[in-house]
Image (tube, helix red, strand yellow):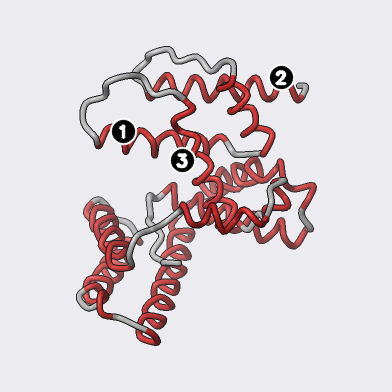
Amino acid sequence: MSEGDGRESYCRDVETYLCRKNGGHLVRIVGPAFEQVTSWATRGIPMRIVFGGIDRYFERYYAKGPRRRPVRIEFCEADVLDLFDEWRRAVGVAATATGENDADDEDVGAIRRRGTLAAHIERVVARLTALRGGEEGPLAPVLTDVVRELDAARAGVKGLRGAARDMLLARLRTLDGELLRMARGSCDATVLRRLEVEADRQLAPFRGRMTEVAYSHSRQASVDRLVREHLRLPTIAFE
């Protein structure tokens, strides 16, 4: 398949997903919108990330009330690029490997805000509590312990400063790592293999510009992220 054919296929897959999100309403991706989406393909943005960005936009759109008109792909670009930035930071794909400018990182990071620490913990507790309600496997006791600890921590989080806040942030990172390790252990070999294949597919556009060591680290981080998505686990760490 030629590069042009690959971009065309990428665009059609995005169009199909967008139409599905619009309740079957046909929204064609042509003209400037086509150039916009094919630029995502050129940059190597994984399809899973594009779909996630579209989902983010739709979540905000529906939260405003009844849908009034079909969503166009142009409206979703900020969310797609924001999620792509989150993904490459999480898996360790440097801007140089994506053909972007590292100098832009600060501006992009300024757009991506996670709110206050207190609000973050509230969201994590809510997500974990919902998961715990339907979890009967090996993760159930772990989720219970984490929720109990975060419940206790959030009571005084608004007044934390300096070393005390740093200690809490370190503890959140530790809890996040422990939960992720347990999550990996709870996945059977078939699921893990499928996620490894997906990780390789997502990283394929950047592999030629990465050292073997960097690729190995990025692949593991990508698998971890996919495990988190598979089990719908929130990120406990707060950066």
Q: Label 2 belongs to which residue? A: 5
Pick whichever, 120 or 194, lies toward us: 120
Q: Quadrant of residue 239?
A: bottom left
Give the percent coordinates (x, y) of residue 101. 69, 51
For image coordinates 48% across by 52% down, the residue present is: 227
Q: Residues within 10 Å of mark 2 (few under 14, many from 20)?
A: few
> What's the amino acid at mark 2?
Asp
- State how far apart marks 3 and 1 are (Cα): 12 Å
Q: Label 1 belongs to which residue? A: 61
Of the numbered discs 3 and 1, the one sitting upstream in the chain is 1
- State how far apart marks 3 and 2 are (Cα): 25 Å
Give the percent coordinates (x, y) of residue 65. 21, 31
For image coordinates 65% across by 40% down, the residue present is: 201
The mark lying in front, picked from 2 and 1, is 1
Q: Label 3 belongs to which residue? A: 79
Pick whichever, 2 or 186, lies toward us: 2
Q: Residues within 10 Å of mark 3 (few under 14, many from 20)?
A: many
Pick whichever, 179 or 18, lies toward us: 18
